[in-house]
Amino acid sequence: MAAASLYAMGSAGAAIAQDAPAEAVEADDDIIIVSGFRASLENALVAKRDSNLIIESVTAEDIGKFPDQNIAESLQRLPGVQIDRENGQGTKVRIRGLEQNLTLLNGDLFVSGQETFKVGEGNFVRNDSLEGVPSELIGGVEVFKSPNASLIEGGLGGVVNLKTRSALDMKDGFTLAGNARMNKGTEIGGWEPSGALVASYNFNDQLGIIASFSYDKTNDHHNVLGGENRGNWAFAAGRRDTATTPTNYYAPEYRYVTDRDQYRRRWGASLGINYRPVDGLELSANYIHSDLKVDTREASLKLPFGQGELLQLNADAVIDSNGVLQSGTVQANSAEVISLVDVTNVTSDNLQFGVDWDNGDNLRVNIAANYSTADLNREVANADVRYTQYGVRATDPGGALIGGVAGNPAAPATWNFTYGNGRFPTFGFGAGTSDDLFTNPANGYFKSHWAFGDRSKVDGHSIKADFAYDVDNSDDNTITLSAGFRYGQRTVEFASGRYLADYSGKGELDATAIPEAERVANFQYNWTPLGYFQDGAIGFKVCDLPEVNKPAAFAGCSRFGNSPAVMTPFQSFLSNPERVETIENFAGGGNIPGNSISVQDRAQMTDALAWIQALYPETPFDFYEDPLRAYLVKEETKSGYIMADMGGEDDPYHVNVGLRIVNTKLRVDQNQPANADPSYWGTDSWNGVLRDFRTDTIVRSTTDFLPSINAVVDVDDSKKVRFSAARVVARQKLDDLGRGFSTNFTRDATAGSPTENLFLFTNGSRGNAELDPFRAYQFDLAYEMYFGRQGLLSVGAFWKEVDSFIVTETVPVFVNDQGGGRLGPVNQPANGTGGRVRGFEIAGQYAFDFGLGFTANYTFSDTETDGSNDFDTDLPLPGVSKHSLNTQVYFERDGFAARASYTWRSKQFVGNFGFGDGGVTRTLGIYQRSYGQLDGQISYDINDNFGVFVEGINLTKANQSAYLQFPELPFRYESGSRRIYVGGKFKF
C-alpha cells in the first residue's frame, strides 16, 4: 500500500484530471472507453480504494460538468451524507446526520458568504449553505469521515473538501470546453439560461493556465404553509376565545399561506496557474469568485386563530384528543395579506498560493497561503393589505382633533373562514362572507409598510507549512514522519437594521430632549421622532405624554384615538390601482378562499429603500443598525501536528498515527441595552432600534489535543478492513455566539381589552458568547470488497461520543411593554450534557460491460441527547434522519447515456418550539416528515466534440412538510418544484 501523501488533501494546486477518460483492456484485447458519469464513479472508486482514510468523493463527469446542478445535490448520493433543502435547492450538508462540518477549498480556508444569513419575514437564521458555490468551477469534492492529524480541525461529522482543476493535469496544448442550457421550473413562466466555459493551456507540463466561467439563472415557485412567522401560539389560558371555546386546542397567532416566487442568478469565475520551473518544484495560484443574487417574492394570507385577531371559533369545531383542530369555522376581525420582497446579494473571493517541493528522494515540503473575503447585503420590503375595515387616524382640515375612521369604509367589518386540517390545510369562505373579499377593489387598503436589511462581512487568511520525511522509503515497511503548523484568522461582522422615517418635520417630538425638570413620573421619555412601521392606525407618540408636555396642537389627543394622522397620504386599491397585482390560483389553488387575491405589486418592491421612500416622498428614510442584532466574532487559531505513517506499496497494511494541537482564541463583541430603561431611535422599542447600548467583549482561549489513528489492512487483493479513532472538535454557530437580546411585539386588537391597541411582548431570542465548541470521540470500523471493473460492496459502523451538544432552550423572561410588561418565551442556545451518534453504512456499486450500472447505499444513524420538551425526553440530535437511502441506475453505451437517481431520508427531529400560554411556557417538538426525490438525466454525444442532454430535478414534485409534536398538527409545508434543463456541451 502506498504511504500517506504529504498531507491528506494536497496543496492548493491539487486537482483531479478530467479530460482523459479512464481506459481498461479486457482479456480479448477489446478496449472499453469509460467516460461521463461512469468515469466519474470510477475515479471516485479509485480514490476510495487508494485512500488511507475513510473517504467518499465525487468527480466531474467532464470539464465544466458536475453530476448535479448543485454541489450539495451531488454529495447527497454518497453513503452517510444527507442534505437540507429549501426552495428547491440543496443547501446544507450533513455527514452522518451532523451539520457541524467543515468546508475547505483545496484543503484550506474557504469562505462562501453564507456562513450565517437570514431568510423570510421571520428572519430565520441559516448557516453554512453550499448553494452559492458554482459547481462548474469545481473538479471534484472529497468527504472525509475520519481525520488524520494533518487535516484542519473543525468537522464533527466530517470535512468537505472542494477541489479545483489544475491545467497541468489537462492534455498538452489548448483545451476548450463548456455547455449551454435552458431551464424552467414548474408553476412559473419563462425559460432561463445557464452555461459554463472552461479554457486551459498546458505548456509541456511546465506551465499551465486554466480559467472558468459559469452562469446560472433559475426561477422557482413554491406554495408554503408557515407555522412560526408569528411565534405567539397558545393552547389554554393564552387563547382569546376560551370563553366561547372551552376545549383547549393549539392555536397559532396566524396561519400563513404563502405564494412564493424565487428568482436566482449566480455567476462565478476562476483562474488557476501552475508552474514547474525545475523538477520537484511547483508553484501554484488559484482564485475563485462567486456572485449570488436571490430575489424572493412572497404574498402571504394571514389567517387569525386563537392568538390573532379572532372573534371566536364556532361551536361546530372538531378538536381531537391531542388538542388539534381538525375542522371548524372562524370569525375574525382581520383579513390581511403581506407582500414581502427579500433581495439578497452574496459575493465571495478566495485566493490561494502554494509551493510544493519534492527532492525526489525522501523529503517533501508544502507551503500555502490563503486569503478569503465575502460580503452579504440583504434588503427586505414589506407591505400589508387589509380587506376588512381598518381604523386609521384622521386629520381635520381645521386642525381639530377627531376620532379615527375606517381607511376602507366599504369593506366588511369582519369575515368568516372555514378550516380543514391536513399537511397543507384548506381554507374557504364561511357563511356571510362574499366570494370577492380579496379581489373587490372597494375592500383593499394599503395598511402598513416597512423595510429592513442585513449586512455581513467575512474576512479570513491563513498560512501553513507541511513537511514529510521518509525514514525508510523502500517499497515495504516504509516509515514516513510528517509535521506542520498553521496560523489562521477569520472575522465575521453581522448587522441587521431598519429603515426609519424621520417624523420631526411632521411635529413629532424628541422625548429624550425634554428636560428632567419637566418630566412627569411614570411616563416614558426614552423615544425619538423616528418610526419603522408606516401604519395609518399609529398616531403621534407625543399623544402618550402628559398634557403638560404636549404642544398646544396635540392637547387632549390619544395616540390610538383622536391623534392626527402621521404618515399620509393613505392609499387604497381605488385610489392607487397601479400598485395592485392579482395572483390567480394563489398558493397552487384550492387551499385558500376564492383562489385569487389582489395584493401589493411585488415587482415594485425590489429596491426596498427606493420603494418606501417613493410612497412617502416628503419624509426622509435612513438605515439604522439594530445593536441587538449586530455582532462581531473574531477567531484566531494556531495549530501544529506530528504524524507517522507506516506501510509501503508492497505492504498489506498502512497505519497512520498523529496528534494535532490547536489553540483557538475567540473574541465576541455582543451588544446589550445600556440600562434598564434605554432610549430608542424610534417612538417605541417595537417601532425602532435601540439607541443606548453597551458592547460586551468576551475573549476566550481554548486548547484542544486531537489524537487520531487510522489503519488499513489488505485481507487480500480485493478486500480491505479499515479502523479509525480520533478526537474531533467543531466550532459554535456564529449567530449563537454573537446575537444580543432581541424581542418581538404584537398589537392587541381585542376590542374592549385593557391593553387594546397596545403593543405587547410576545417572544424573544438571544445568543450566548460563553458557548463551548462541540467536542467528541469518534470510532469507525469498515469492510470493503472490490470486484470487477467497478464493483464494490462495503459495510461500516461508526460511533461518536459527544461531550456536549449545543441545544436551544426556551425560558420565560419578563419584558416591559406598553401594557406594563409580561412573561414570554425566550429562546437561547446552551451547552447540553452530551450525547452519542452511532450507526452503520452499507454501500454497493457495479458497472456491467454492456453499459448498465448502479450504485446504492443505506445509512442508519441513531442519536440521543439529554434534550427534552413537554412530551419527550432523550431527544435525538436535530436534523438527523435515522434512515437514509440513495440509489442510482445508469446506462452508457455508444454515446448514449441515461441515469435515474433517487434519494430518501426518514423523519427527523428539527428542534423544539416554545411559546407562552397565559403565564405558562409550553415546548413541543418540530418533526420534518420523510422525503424522497427522483432526478433523471439523458444525454447523447454526437461525436467527440459535441453532445446534447436533458435533465430533470425532482421529477415527481415531491413536497416537504413538518408537524408540531403530533403528526396531525401541521407546522410547515413547501410544495415541490420540478426543474427541467435542456442543453448542449462541447469540448475541443
Image: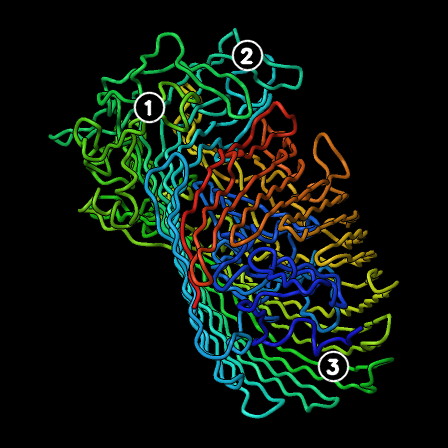
Say which amino acid is labelled 1: Ser
Mark 2, Cα crowd under 10 Å, few <14 / some 14-19 / many 20+, is some
Task: Name the outermost residue toward the left.
Answer: 398
- Tell me, for residue 483, which label it has, or none: 3
Is 429 placed above or below 495 here?
above
Residue type pointed to by label 3: Ala
Which one is in front in this view, the residue at disc 3 or the one at disc 2?
Answer: 3
Residue 345, given in percent of the width and then of the height, sits at 39, 56
Q: Which residue corresponds to the image point at 31% horizontal and 29% vertical from the top-left?
A: 583
**Label 2 belongs to which residue?**
245
Q: What kind of residue is marked 2?
A: Thr
**Res. 733 image quadrant:** bottom right
Q: Is residue 688 visible in this depiction of the protein?
A: no
Which tag, 2 or 1, sits closer to the chain's start?
Answer: 2
CA gap, disc 3 and disc 2 = 71 Å
Question: Disc 2 to disc 1, how far (Cα)?
Answer: 31 Å
Q: Quadrant of the N terminus?
A: bottom right
* Mark 1 Cα shell of 10 Å, populated few (<14), some (14-19), many (≥20): many
Say if 773 sits above or below 897 in the image: below
SS class of the residue under badge 1?
A: loop
Q: Quadrant of residue 465?
A: bottom right
Q: Is residue 467 toward the left or the right of residue 312 in the image?
A: right
In the rendered view, does 801 fall on the left or right side of 822? right
Seen from the viewer's position, the closer of residues 639 and 726 is: 726
